[in-house]
Image (tube, rainbow, N blue to C red):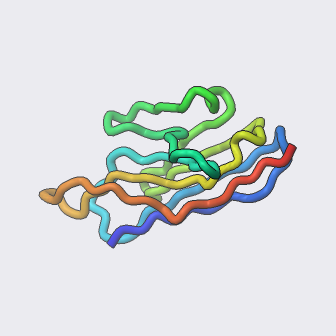
Amino acid sequence: QVQLVESGGGLVQAGGSLRLSCAASGSIFSINAMGWYRQAPGKRRELVATFTSDGSINYVEPVKGRFTISRDSAKKTVYLQMNSLKPEDTAVYYCNAAVRVSLISAWNTYWGQGTQVTVSS
């Protein structure tokens, strides 16, 4: 069993900052891609920032220059530093990871339960 637990969401005024954390735990042999998605009310879930399988980083265009993704591989944790927040950043933020539980198992995708980020104008 693999769990992804997010923390760090909350209410902040426009221009403020928040730092999200996502810790992976359970029967983990290795983690491949790991990152953040978000879903605003009435909208589809979208990629925000992620470490890809080859170790590169992708950001969705609206957050470039404001958000920074980082990770601590030893702690199986990924972070999202969000600066200069805007009301349109309001959403539930989800952690996502591709995990395998043994050397010979398939990669499976896991999601966290989500953390609410609300940016007031």
Q: Position of residue 104 (x, y in %)?
A: 12, 57
Query: Which residue occupies the foreground of this view, 120 or 102?
Result: 120
Left/right placement of residue 87 relative to residue 92 reads right
Query: Which residue occupies the foreground of this view, 6 or 88?
Result: 88
**Residue farthest toward the left in the current orientation of the protein:** 104
Q: Indicate the quadrant containing the N terminus: top left, top right, bottom left or bottom right.
A: bottom left
Query: Which residue occupies the foreground of this view, 80 or 60?
Result: 60
In this rendering, the answer to whether 16 lies above or below 97 is above
Left/right placement of residue 32 relative to residue 46 reads left
Residue at (48% x, 62% y) in the render: 112
Residue at (36% x, 68% y) in the render: 2
**Residue farthest toward the front in the current orientation of the protein:** 42
For the image shown, how many numbered marks are present on the structure? 0
Image quadrant where residue 114 sits = bottom right
In this rendering, the answer to whether 73 lies above or below 69 is below
Q: Position of residue 32 (x, y in %)?
A: 32, 47
Q: Position of residue 96 (x, y in %)?
A: 44, 53
Residue at (47% x, 40% y) in the render: 50
In this rendering, the answer to whether 19 lies above or below 46 is below
In this rendering, the answer to whether 11 lies above or below 88 is below
Q: Indicate the quadrant containing the C terminus: top left, top right, bottom left or bottom right.
A: top right
Left/right placement of residue 6 relative to residue 82 reads left
